Amino acid sequence: MSCGEPHETDCSEILDHLYEFLDREMPDAECTKFEHHFEECSPCLEKYGLEQAVKKLVKRCCGHDDVPGDLRAKVMGRIDLIRSGQSVPEHDVTAAPATPQES
């Protein structure tokens, strides 16, 4: 997505890192760069608004469950692998064996 106008920061870079901005997981200087981009690019601002609304809806509907620490660590590790460009195994989560149900 791009509005077709030249910007200091390309729309693709903004959209690739939109969730980092939404979650405030980037340095303040980067946040300022995003805010400036949204001021001049209505398609990216619209996408930001939509993603922000979805995030709020998910938080309202699902934000009461505690996430186990090991799950968070696994997810963050996978995100780091993807960001670094490494290949990620499709099925790298081992499931506990099913136990027979008692009658």
Image (cartoon, rainbow, N blue to C red):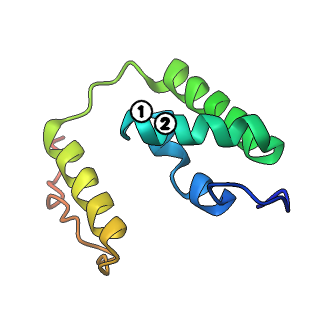
Quadrant the N terminus occupies: bottom right
For this orientation, the residue located farthest to the right is 4
- Tell me the kind of residue under disc 1: Arg
Residue drawn where x is 78% and y is 40% of the image: 40
Read off the residue under disc 1: 24
Residue drawn where x is 74% and y is 34% of the image: 39
Task: Choose between 55 and 71: the one closer to the eye.
Answer: 55
Query: Does 25 appear above or below 43?
Result: above
Q: Is residue 93 left or right of residue 1?
A: left
Read off the residue under disc 2: 31
Label 1: element kind = loop
Q: Position of residue 103 (x, y in %)?
A: 18, 40
Q: Is residue 12 left or right of residue 43?
A: left
Query: Does 24 appear above or below 43?
Result: above
State which tag comes first along the sequence, 2 or 1.
Answer: 1
Residue drawn where x is 61% and y is 54% of the image: 15
Asked if the residues shown at circle 2 and circle 1 are in contact, with their CB atoms under 8 angstroms apart, the answer is: yes
